[in-house]
Amino acid sequence: MKLLLVALTPTALGLLAVLAAVGLLPFMTGLPHPQPLQRKSGVPGSPNVVVARNAAGRWFADGVAVDDQTLERRLSARGDSLTVRFLPSDRLSTAEVSTSLAWLRRRTKGSLQLELMGG
């Protein structure tokens, strides 16, 4: 047992030294820490509403399920300072996304942004 411990000690110390060196690498290179990317709205200072549509065709505004008429009233009441961020389901076809964008464009006076989920 003692022989095995003596044989593994240099290996364990070497592994520990390599791990420490790799862990200190960002500090030694002086690279800045990564910062999250800030999303910009269409018009500075404008209120945003996130509108999503699922594969069943159901609308969601800021995470709450709404019907077409309620969404239309909500968008038209906010005026031209509103920025709408449209987040379609990845299960919608291109034609369905295009139709949804056209529907939103007709009912939105402000900026309309398409945001796609992706990896």
Image (spheres, grey):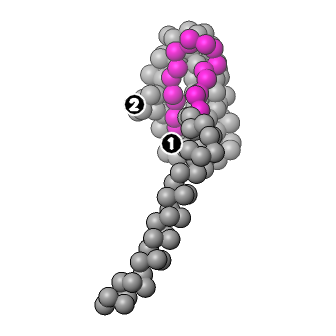
Q: Looking at the image, which is closer to me, 33 or 113? A: 33
Quarter of image, res 35: top right
Closest to the observer: 104 or 115? Answer: 115
Q: Secondary structure at mark 1?
A: loop
Q: Residue furthest left?
A: 1
* Relative depth, front residue between 27 and 105: 27
Residue nearest the observer in this picture, 37 or 6: 6
| Quadrant location of the N terminus in the rendered image | bottom left
Q: Residue at x 32, y 88 (%)?
A: 2
Q: Earlier in the sequence, mark 1 or mark 2?
A: 1
**Residue 6 location (% of width, % of height):** 39, 84
* Residue 79 point in image, percent of width and height: 56, 9
13 vs 49: above or below: below
- For image coordinates 64% across by 32% down, the residue present is 114
Query: Which type of secondary structure does the marked residue at label 2 adopt?
Result: strand
Res. 64 mark:
2
Please say whether residue 76 is visible from this viewpoint. Answer: no
Q: Which residues are magenta?
A: 37-54
* Amino acid type at image mark 1: Asn
Task: Rate crowding at label 2 as few (under 14), some (14 to 19) or many (20 or more) other CA atoms within 10 Å.
Answer: few
Residue 22 lies, with reference to residue 54, above or below; the image says below
Left or right of residue 46, residue 61 in this image: left
Relative to 68, does residue 33 appear above or below in the rendering?
below
Task: Return the mark for residue 116.
Answer: none
Q: Is residue 74 found left or right of 39 in the rendered image?
A: left
Q: Amino acid at mark 2?
A: Val
Q: Which residue is mark 1?
A: 54
Locate residue 49 relative to residue 5 in the image: left or right.
right
Q: Main secondary structure of the magenta part?
A: loop
Q: Tell me the residue at 50%/64% (across/down).
A: 17
| x, y percent for residue 9 | 41, 77
Q: Whole-percent x and y of residue 84?
A: 57, 23
